[in-house]
Amino acid sequence: MTDDPAMSAARDRVLDSLNRLDAARRHAVSVTIGASTTRHAVTAKFLARLAESTHASPELREFSRRVSAKDTTWDRLEFDAKPIPAEVRELRADLSVDWPGNWPLQTEEQPFRIEWQ
């Protein structure tokens, strides 16, 4: 090995870069992405606020208008909205969102009856 100052400086820069790269790698490995345990419940109030957003789809805004006019209710969103708003598909697919277990409600659904009863 030679004691060339230029070679020594280059080696030090490479070693410093490798140390910074290793530190960045260790930091990246230690960061957990998407592990939020916070769950969000979907409610009629939440959907109404979402429909008021500037980013709401036209389908969700139209359904909100129908809810305001008392033509339907938020719990019937998946039955009465044609087409179903994209927000509903996204919320249903999101693991951190709790969709109400009793939604959608089918008010006209009757218990099974045998015709001759």
Image (cartoon, grey):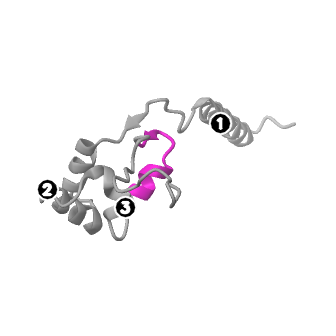
Q: Which residue is mark 2?
A: 68
Q: Secondary structure at mark 2?
A: helix
**Three-letter residue code for mark 3:** Phe
Q: Identify the residue under disc 1.
A: 25
Q: Which residue, given by chain and number where applicable, does mark 3 sit on?
A: 79
Residue depicted at 79% across the width and 34% down the height? 3
Residue 84 or residue 9, whichever sits in front: 84
Mark in front: 2 vs 1? 2
**Amino acid beneath label 2:** Ser
Residue at (37, 50) in percent of width and height:
105
Residue 15, horizontal then vertical, whole percent: 70, 35
Residue at disc 1, secondary structure: helix
Measuring from the top left, give residue 88's x and y in whole percent: 39, 56
Magenta extent: 88-99
Q: Residue at x 39, y 51 (%)?
A: 104
Q: Is residue 93 magenta?
A: yes
Could you give the CA–CA distance between mark 2 and mark 3, rounded to whole angstroms? Answer: 17 Å
Residue 16: x %, y % from top left = 65, 34
Label 1: few (<14), some or many (≥20) within 10 Å?
A: few
- Label 2 or label 3, whichever comes before in sequence order: 2
Q: Is residue 97 left or right of residue 21?
A: left
Q: Residue at x 26, y 59 (%)?
A: 55
Mark 1 or mark 3: whose residue is earlier in sequence: 1
Q: Residues within 10 Å of mark 3 (few under 14, many from 20)?
A: some
Residue 89: image quadrant is: bottom left
Q: CA distance from mark 1 to mark 3?
A: 49 Å
Q: Disc 1 residue type? A: Arg
Mark nearer the N terminus (2 vs 1): 1
